[in-house]
Amino acid sequence: GFVVGHAGLYQALAMFAVAYFIIGMTVLSVCAIATNGALDAGGAYYMISRALGPEFGGSIGIMFFLANVCGSALYVLGLVEAVVDSFGIPPGEYHPAWRQGSACVPYLGSCSAVPSTMPSVVSHGSPSPLASKYDVDYTTGQMMSFSSVFAVMFNGCTGIMAGSNMSGDLKRPSYSIPRGTISAVLFTYLVYNLLAFLMCATCNRILLQKDYGFLRDISIFPPLVTVGIYAATLSAAMSNLIGASRILYALARDDLFGRALALAKKTSASGNPVMAVILSWLVVQVVLFSGKLNTIASVVTTFFLLVYATVNLACLALEWASAPNFRPTFRYFTWHTCLLGIAGCCVMMFLISPVSASASLGFFLLLLLALHYLSPSSTWGYISQALIFHQVRKYLLMLDVRKDHVKFWRPQMLLMVQNPRGSARLIDFVNDLKKSGLYVLGHVELQDLDMLPSDPLQPQQESWLSLVDKLNVKAFVSLTLAPSVRHGVRQLLFTSGLGGMRPNTLVLGFYDDEAPQDGLARHPAFTSAREEVPLGFPPLRAPTAPKLLSDREYVGIVADALKMLRNVLLARQLESLDKAWELRRAASPAPTIHVWPVNLLRPDSARYADTCSLFLLQMACVLNMARAWRRARLRLFLCVEAGTMPHAQEEKLRQLLKDLRIQAQIQLVPWDAITRLHWQTCQGSPGGPAEEEEEEEGVVNFPTNTAQVSDEYVCAANKLVLEQSPAPTVRFLYLPRPPADTSLYPLYLHQLELLTRGLGPTVLVHGVSAVTSTQL
């Protein structure tokens, strides 16, 4: 009568249609989730939390609990008004409705409300209420509107979750919930429409607007109406209270809020959550102090609509994730129905009360963030992971390697790690070098799977993933079994990555005789935390213990990577780099990055525009672009000889840097004294048959150079680099190509060791791919 009196028959039918459209879409989603697996106590909370994760589930669970509690208080207030209307108030006594409701709750078991029933005012001759004519509500003194009437009406439609809230008490919830819920929705929709037609046909507008208890006056047996009001409000309040207690019990049992809800876990001997019922009853008592029916109505409606929207969102996410295990036996839904349900709920929330809707969303987001950061991890499964997988797979298929362009090149790193205990700072350094590219931590376990009962890598995976989380690096982990380290690195170079995301750069620690240091024990991520260093990693190799790979195998790995057209970086003494101290110290001058884009072992091939030199420049620039390294300054060293027009070379290099948009300081370094020690200078001018032959092959560093370069020359080159002051934070040097003769591998490695001895953190770089562009 309240709805038809204010909104008229036409708008009343429209309200019913809109409300039941939203409810119908939500019911389809509820039925789909309910028939996809075993349900436990908690109803909508259980569905949402197991589908969307604990953050969404816990946030919506609290709001659904409050919605049911407020709904119960709403029905209690309605019952009180009906009781007062039936029996009156003793003369000289007046108690506000909320006090009477509070007094009724213990005796009625938390009861309920349909619109209030006040003394009737009958007016004859008024036109029938077909069209809308909103007036002042005589119980609140407020002007009614479509949104306020819809808010009150919608509370009579929120019982669709009553069955699902009792999911823990049902014998076969997956069978009973769909059938019971759909039957109840269809039945109530027909009854509401029939009542609207009958009231419009038999009652005038003034009667409907001024007397919400008019049915007693026109009924053949008036006491039956009173009993019906009491029964309806009592059952509705009981339903909401019991539903709220089951939600509270489920929240407490899942430990999302820790000790705050510990009391609600206690049950009776038969398993009934008695403490949850008592706590819910106490909250109902508190809500009753808010006062009038219509004050609570908009808040309750907003909360219910938000819960319904989230139920639809959960079903939509499960459908879009396309997980094979999402196989509900109820198939009468699509993602379109879920979207329509979400849209309908959101639109009606803001139409009813923009303030309440905004406050509800703010409260929801606050709970979401709190649970995200404070709640313990769960084993329920996260729908976000399924959705991410679905989208990543789709976009990986769209990432076509045939459309790669040098303008959009980015480093994609494979860092080989023998033991993370000795490589913590190197892992962090390479993370700065990746520039939003792929980053893979590779590890080779020297075992034979044929001789093992099971895969030994599976237990190690958790330790590696925990390491990535603790070091806060954006990296994947790739572990493999192989008979040798060289074979394992080959496997990882061939198989790491997927589609267009494959490593294009191999990073290795340097091969030397220095004793490894436990970097994890000194790393801030572990020294400042309560957790111990991950125990899944073995102790570091003792200085006297044999190494797992030989010098020949190490150089062979470098040669293999270059044959596979992978760029190579060799990092020496990166574990001695204290990045936090070096880059954040206040003393001037600013930290520097020294760049030597010339092959120091071949002074006759000193070119600054070849592929390798440009790649070296690019890597130094990429490091300088990282947030932690932006304060550092690039210093580029131009090695010049007498009589070679050094200023012209400097201007040419400066123009190259300008074209590449690289900001760096150029420093001229005379190295006549160094080049005199090179074997080619000692034997005569270059251009002999051996050089011509290798220039035709396009090999920059040929075997005879490795064999004939003296230690005196290499030490002089090392001294030249070391003398440039002030000392930099890190150095980038040109890495010569390994010799073709494998017997010279130990000598090649020896020369690299002499070249980088005492230089501090140093990165040797050899690039094989074009990585710079001067185009837009």
Image: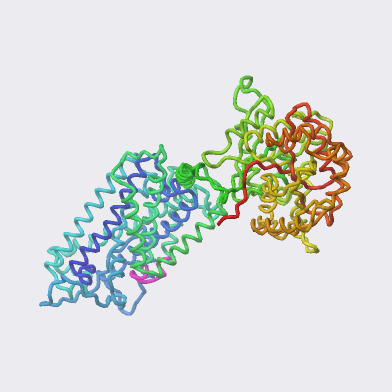
With 172 as the anchor, is 769 left or right in this view?
Answer: right
Q: How is the image coloured?
A: rainbow
Q: Nearer the viewer, residue 132 or 100?
A: 132
Q: Residue at x 41, y 37 (%)?
A: 325
With 369 as the anchor, is 674 left or right in this view?
Answer: right
Q: Nearer the viewer, residue 250 or 108?
A: 250
Q: Position of residue 2 (x, y in %)?
A: 23, 69
Q: Residue at x 75, y 51 (%)?
A: 595
Q: Position of residue 190 (x, y in %)?
A: 19, 55
| Residue 265 visible in the picture | no
Q: Residue at x 36, y 57 (%)?
A: 109
Magenta part mainly helix, strand or loop?
A: helix
Quadrant holding the C terminus:
bottom right
Outermost residue, top side? 451
Q: Position of residue 725 (x, y in %)?
A: 84, 56
| Residue 186 visible in the picture | yes
Task: Please determine whether, in this image, residue 306 is positioned above or below residue 520.
Answer: below
Outermost residue, left side? 125
Outermost residue, bottom side? 92
Quadrant holding the N terminus:
bottom left
The region drawn magenta spans: 286-296
Q: Nearer the viewer, residue 188 or 324?
A: 324
Q: How many marks?
A: 0
Q: Residue at x 36, y 44 (%)?
A: 34
Q: Nearer the viewer, residue 218 or 412?
A: 412
Task: Please determine whether, in this image, residue 315 is positioned above or below residue 689.
Answer: below
